[in-house]
Image (cartoon, rainbow, N blue to C red):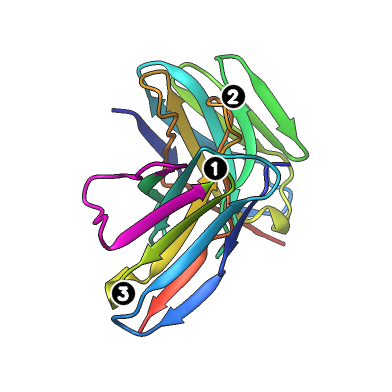
Amino acid sequence: EDQVTQSPEALRLQEGESSSLNCSYTVSGLRGLFWYRQDPGKGPEFLFTLYSAGEEKEKERLKATLTKKESFLHITAPKPEDSATYLCAVQDTTGGSYIPTFGRGTSLIVHP
Amino acid sequence: GAVVSQHPSRVICKSGTSVKIECRSLDFQATTMFWYRQFPKQSLMLMATSNEGSKATYEQGVEKDKFLINHASLTLSTLTVTSAHPEDSSFYICSARDQGQGDSPLHFGNGTRLTVT
């Protein structure tokens, strides 16, 4: 059974204070790891897909990296508008359902 | 691209009534759509997989007679909460991916906040 663990559960940063969010996973064979951002009362918004260890993706102040056991979402010089819950999900190679398993998310608050 | 529209965004209904939630893929076709439920500070809980032209697949513990799913076309799936009770109050979110792209990410609607009084 696929497992996804995100840490920390909550993170408070000052504006400009860089940090990283962690997503540890266990899958039989990784078919994709996805990062989403979710604002309160909204559906998750897709950010990145990573497929293989060593891969990196960047978008504005966010950078996602992937190893064989975990992924990091690095936030450089965050702004208050980066405050949201960040969800990680993995999809494995078994079966044909292509249903990702989600972690519980990290709630990020960036103070001005 | 890959926009999923969900309506209504919030609904309040009385106990015992039914509520229908619509999920549409606006710029792509989706043979499969997914319905999730989310509790406060919890992750997404998959309720069922909606399959165009066939019966939905429900996750263990989800009552199929209570949560009716219809996927009549490649761009529309509906979730009907029948005989709603206060414990059905929750945030329901649908998602879909572009047909034939199994490795691609899911794209989500903006969710429906259901309150049963």
- Magenta stretch: includes residue B58: yes
Q: Tag 2, which chain?
A: A
Task: Tell me the distance, in whole angstroms, between the alpha carbons under discs 3 and 1.
Answer: 25 Å
Q: Does any portion of residue A9 appear in the rendered image?
A: no
Q: Quadrant of residue A50?
A: top right
Residues marked 3 and 1, same chain: yes
Amino acid type at mark 1: Ala
Considering depth in this image, is A103 or A12 the residue closer to the camera? A103
Q: Is residue A59 magenta?
A: no
3 and 1 marks in contact (CB < 8 Å): no
Give left or right: position of B70 versus A110. Answer: left
Q: Is residue B97 above or below residue A71?
A: below
Q: What amino acid is at disc 3?
A: Ala
In the rendered image, the vertical position of residue B59 relative to residue A92, given as above or below: below
What range is drawn magenta here?
Answer: B50-72
Amino acid, disc 2: Leu
Chain holding disc 1 = B
Q: Is residue B14 above or below residue A34?
A: below
For marks 3 and 1, the one nearer the N-term is 3
Host chain of mark 3: B
x 32%, y 60%: residue: B67
Give the farthest residue toward the left. Answer: B61
Q: Position of residue A28 (x, y in %)?
A: 35, 17
Which quadrant does the N terminus of chain A fall into? Answer: top left
Secondary structure at badge 1 equals strand
Q: Position of residue A98 (x, y in %)?
A: 44, 29
Which residue is pictured at 67% across the width and 48% down the height? Answer: B3
Query: Where residue B96 is drawn, which disc sits there?
Result: 1
Residue plotted at (34% across, 80% down): B17
SS at mark 3 in the image: loop
Q: Which residue is mark 3?
A: B84
Task: Choose top left, top right, bottom left or bottom right for residue A12.
Answer: bottom right
